[in-house]
Image: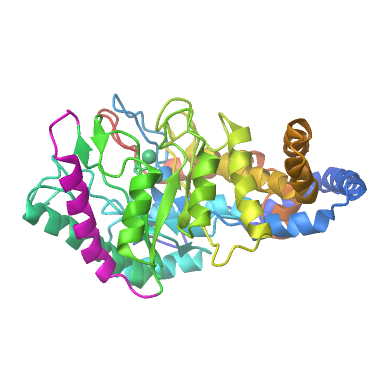
């Protein structure tokens, strides 16, 4: 339970005052960009309106400072419970006006009264997106260990415990108003021969069938693949092929979740995205960026062009009016050296930037170049959109929804971090942390 009245906030009036100081410059830059785009046959308002509609779920686990396998260096004013996490998420939404949805992780976000949590979130402008189950670590009080797996464990009792946890996540999600469950498991093997690869997959499917049977009709189930880690030799849901086989085996409410960091460094992720769209099984994304592995770095921080190419496929699907196309957008990041709120602000902006740039692609021209096998002009068409500075569109979309023209600057002058630092006791440093 949190004291609503006492919790630090960034008020709408504060944002409006900060915006007022930047307003003349924004109008000027927006007008200039509008004229540039109009010469290219693009109506800037159409793009701004589409960006305004863009929503991404903030991950509750990303407002605290993460860690690596080696250490966790706590930040100041870290949230200690799900209510405080909501307060931080509300700041991200206040400033970006694009993250009104929060994705929770259980049992990390467990609390005694979920109705109260839903009401609290609602009172600060938030609702709940996909809930995540956690059977990749042992939680205090848990009867059986997940050391050798969970949903695919050789022991039926461990599998039953993992299934029960997922069903509990659905129950909690129901109270919170969520409509999707994301399943990522750490199951797999560290050594060749450790595990019967085929049987482990069969056991996973069998367990997921039991979870699927408990899924309400208006819910979706997302299966998330990951190349490696914590299992280093083979994971049970290693790639999008395994994820797709699982989703197809489960039924029409099961879809694949693409976490951008869960592939080998050279994998063509946008191609995976198009394949999943083609078979109607793209459930959504965990956005982040990476250089080497599951780095969980801020979205667009390493390879913004790749992010753009992913959004290019999403916009293409929108443009083709692919039936039932409604991927859930979520962030999944770990913030080790930055203020987590600032990383979430920056990442949300980067997603909107990639989306806006993808909306600028001249798709008729591109199709012509593709038909004519004009490789150079086809790729130039993409580059032309990608190199357009869409900053004024993003700022205008935010301002119209009550967000900040310059979210990070506004956050830094708000004193929010100092205010929560004074209220929230410092957390422990030390051992590694998974998020
Ligand atoms: C995993 C995976 C899951 C996330 C955990 C914390 O690598 O990305 O989605 O819930 O990390
Ligand atoms: Mn993920
Ligand atoms: Mn991950």
Residue 196 drawn at (x, y percent) = 14, 40
Which part of the image, by quadrant, shows the N terminus?
A: bottom left
Check the image and name the residue furthest to the front: 372
Which residue is at the front of the view, 70 or 331? 331
Query: Residue at (56%, 41%) from the top-left corner?
Result: 347
What's the magenta bit mostly, secondary-structure-wise? helix
The residue closer to the viewer here, 340 or 244, is 244
Q: Position of residue 285 (x, y in %)?
A: 48, 49
Determine the quadrant in which ligand 3 lies: top left
For the point 19% across and 44% down, the residue is: 198
Q: Per the image, is 31 magenta?
A: no
Query: Is 131 displayed left or right of 15 in the figure?
Result: left
In the rendered view, tell whether residue 259 sits above or below residue 8. above
| Residue drawn at the location 65% of the way across and 52% of the way down | 315
Q: Position of residue 89 (x, y in %)?
A: 49, 52
Residue 299: in sight, yes or no? yes
User: Considering depth in this image, is 197 or 116 the residue closer to the camera?
Assistant: 197
Q: Is residue 389 visible?
A: no
219 lies above or below 283: below
| Whether residue 147 is situated above or below residue 55 in the rendered picture | above
- Residue 187 placement: quadrant: top left
Residue range (magenta)? 190-217
């Amino acid at each position: 339970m949190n004291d609503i009245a006492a919790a630090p906030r960034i008020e709408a009036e504060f944002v409006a005052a900060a915006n007022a100081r930047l307003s003349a410059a924004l109008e000027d830059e927006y007008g200039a960009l509008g004229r540039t785009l109009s010469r290219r046959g693009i109506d800037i308002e159409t793009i701004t309106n589409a960006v305004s509609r863009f929503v991404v779920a903030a991950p509750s686990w990303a407002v605290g400072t993460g860690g690596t396998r080696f250490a966790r260096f706590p930040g100041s004013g870290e949230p200690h419970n799900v209510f405080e996490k909501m307060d931080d998420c509300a700041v991200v939404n206040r400033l970006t006006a694009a993250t009104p949805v929060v994705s929770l992780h259980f049992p990390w976000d467990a609390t005694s009264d979920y109705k109260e949590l839903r009401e609290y979130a609602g009172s600060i402008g938030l609702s709940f997106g996909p809930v995540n189950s956690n059977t990749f670590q042992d939680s205090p009080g848990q009867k059986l260990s997940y050391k050798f797996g969970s949903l695919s464990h050789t022991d039926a009792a461990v599998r039953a415990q993992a299934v029960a946890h997922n069903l509990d996540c659905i129950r909690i999600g129901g109270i919170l108003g969520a409509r999707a469950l994301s399943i990522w498991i750490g199951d797999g093997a560290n050594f060749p021969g450790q595990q019967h690869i085929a049987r482990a997959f069969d056991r996973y499917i069998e367990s997921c069938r039991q979870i699927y049977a408990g899924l309400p009709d208006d819910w979706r189930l997302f299966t998330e693949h990951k190349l490696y880690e914590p299992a280093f030799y083979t994971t049970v849901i290693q790639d999008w092929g395994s994820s797709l086989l699982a989703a197809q085996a489960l039924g029409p409410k099961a879809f694949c979740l693409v976490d951008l960091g869960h592939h080998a460094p050279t994998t063509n992720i946008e191609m995976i995205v198009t394949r999943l769209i083609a078979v109607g099984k793209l459930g959504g994304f965990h956005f982040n960026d990476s250089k080497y592995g599951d780095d969980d770095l801020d979205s667009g921080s390493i390879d913004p062009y790749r992010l753009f190419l992913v959004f290019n496929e999403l916009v293409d699907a929108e443009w083709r009016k692919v039936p039932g196309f409604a991927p859930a957008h979520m962030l999944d990041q770990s913030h080790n050296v930055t203020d987590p709120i600032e990383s979430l602000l920056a990442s949300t902006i980067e997603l909107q930037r990639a989306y806006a740039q993808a909306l600028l692609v001249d798709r008729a021209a591109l199709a012509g170049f593709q038909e004519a096998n004009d490789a150079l002009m086809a790729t130039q068409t993409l580059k032309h959109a990608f190199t357009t500075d869409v900053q004024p569109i993003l700022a205008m979309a935010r301002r119209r929804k009550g967000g900040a023209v310059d979210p990070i600057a506004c956050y830094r002058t708000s004193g929010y971090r100092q205010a929560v630092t004074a209220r929230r006791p410092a957390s422990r440093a030390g051992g590694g942390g998974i998020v």
